[in-house]
Amino acid sequence: MRPERLDAAFSALADPTRRAILARLARGDATVMELVEPFEMTQPAITKHLKVLERAGLISRSRDGQRRPCRLEAHALRDIDRWIERFREIGEERFEALDEVLEDLKRDERKPRRKS
């Protein structure tokens, strides 16, 4: 994922309303008016959130006659997940190395010590 697209995605995901919109779209396509329903916001306010999500590549909008349904773009979320996964793997490798050090210390503590 390009750095500017990644920045836009994380910026879009920083807002709880936009995360809630994505959660709703994960259940299926929805129109702007359907997305407005659960929020105490105006249609223009929700439209602004949708534009941020669209610029970040997290959703798309299409035309279906008079309807303009919004759709979650799962591939963008997979790209974010891949980016995060690299850091998860690094963290797990470090924890595994730390576990080995701790096990070595425990073994050393169990060994009988010689008196001088």
Image (cartoon, rainbow, N blue to C red):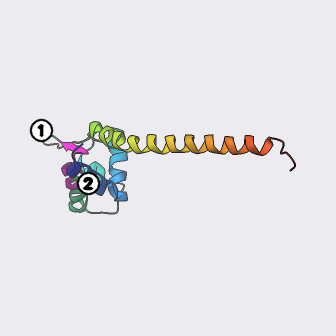
Q: What residue is rendered at 20% in x and 49% in y?
A: 54
**On the image, numbered disc 2 is attached to which residue?**
7
Q: Locate residue 30, reporting x and y percent.
A: 27, 43
Q: Quadrant of residue 16?
A: bottom left
Q: Is residue 100 visible?
A: yes
Residues under numbered marks 2 and 1 in contact, where contact means CB atoms less than 8 Å apart: no
Using the image, determine if residue 20 lies above or below residue 60: below
**Which is in the foreground here, disc 2 or disc 1?**
2
Instruction: Locate residue 67 relative to residue 96 in the image: left or right.
Output: left
The residue under label 1 is which amino acid type? Gly
Instruction: Locate residue 24 relative to residue 67 in the image: left or right.
Output: right
Using the numbered discs, state the Cα–Cα distance from disc 2 to disc 1 in whole angstroms. 34 Å
The residue under label 2 is which amino acid type? Asp
Q: Which residues are magenta?
A: 51-61
Q: Quadrant of residue 26?
A: top left
Q: Is residue 56 visible?
A: no
Q: What residue is rendered at 24% in x and 62% in y?
A: 45
**On the image, numbered disc 1 is attached to which residue?**
65
Q: Locate residue 47, reporting x and y percent.
A: 21, 56
Quadrant the N terminus occupies:
top left
Q: What residue is rendered at 22% in x and 49% in y?
A: 5
Q: Mark 2 or mark 1: which comes first in sequence?
A: 2
Q: Nearer the viewer, residue 86 or 82?
A: 86
Residue sticking out furthest to the right: 115
Q: Quadrant of residue 38?
A: bottom left
Q: Residues within 10 Å of mark 2 (few under 14, many from 20)?
A: few
